[in-house]
Amino acid sequence: MAIQITRRLEFDAGHRIPDHGSQCRHLHGHRYAIEVTVEGPIHDAPGRADNGMVLDFSDVKTIVRDVVVDPWDHAFLVWRDDAVVRAMLSSIPNHKTVVLDRVPTAENLAAHAFELIDAALHQRFGDTLTLVCVRLYETPNCWSDAKR
């Protein structure tokens, strides 16, 4: 039997959707939330710290924090082809800017986060666990799911 576990973390970041037909084309920010769902067997290993678990929630937190939350928190997420904003941000000394190869929509951010977390999870745990879903909330009422 496979069991799924989910861990939620939050971070703040700015972005803009340059081709958007409304307000989102302007510079703005969000309090993002990310939920990461991992699937695997429950460990039956008396005496081990992970006995009875698929994975310790703190391990999920560490991976997600390392590859998504810490790099993106209080950063401006900018599309590599958004030349005007990239130039503006580069003029600010020590500005935390993350340049992405795709427009930073909720959908693209969820997909990119999935790729980053999947690689880190595989590197640390091999094929014993499966990343099932990354849900990225842009607002409390709007989110995108990236699923395997």
Image: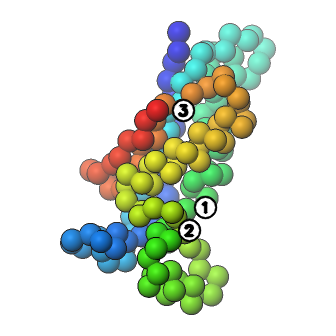
Three-letter amino acid code of the residue under disc 1: Pro
Left or right for 83, reference 105: right
Amino acid residing under circle 2: Val
Alpha carbons under labels 3 and 1: distance apart: 20 Å
Q: Which residue is mark 2?
A: 98
For image coordinates 32% across by 77% down, the residue present is 26
Q: Which mark is residue 23?
A: none
For disc 2, the neighbor class at 10 Å (few under 14, some 14 to 19, many from 20) is: some
First of labels 3, 2 by sequence position? 2
Q: Earlier in the sequence, mark 1 or mark 2?
A: 1
The numbered mark at residue 131 is: 3
Q: Note whether residue 78 is visible.
A: no
Q: Earlier in the sequence, mark 3 or mark 1?
A: 1
Q: Residues within 10 Å of mark 1 (few under 14, many from 20)?
A: some
Q: What residue did someone put label 1 on?
A: 71
In this view of the protein, can residue 62 be seen by the observer?
A: yes
Q: Position of residue 147 (x, y in %)?
A: 43, 35
Q: How is the image coloured?
A: rainbow
Residue sitting at x 64%, y 41%: 119
Count of all numbered marks drawn on residues in the image: 3
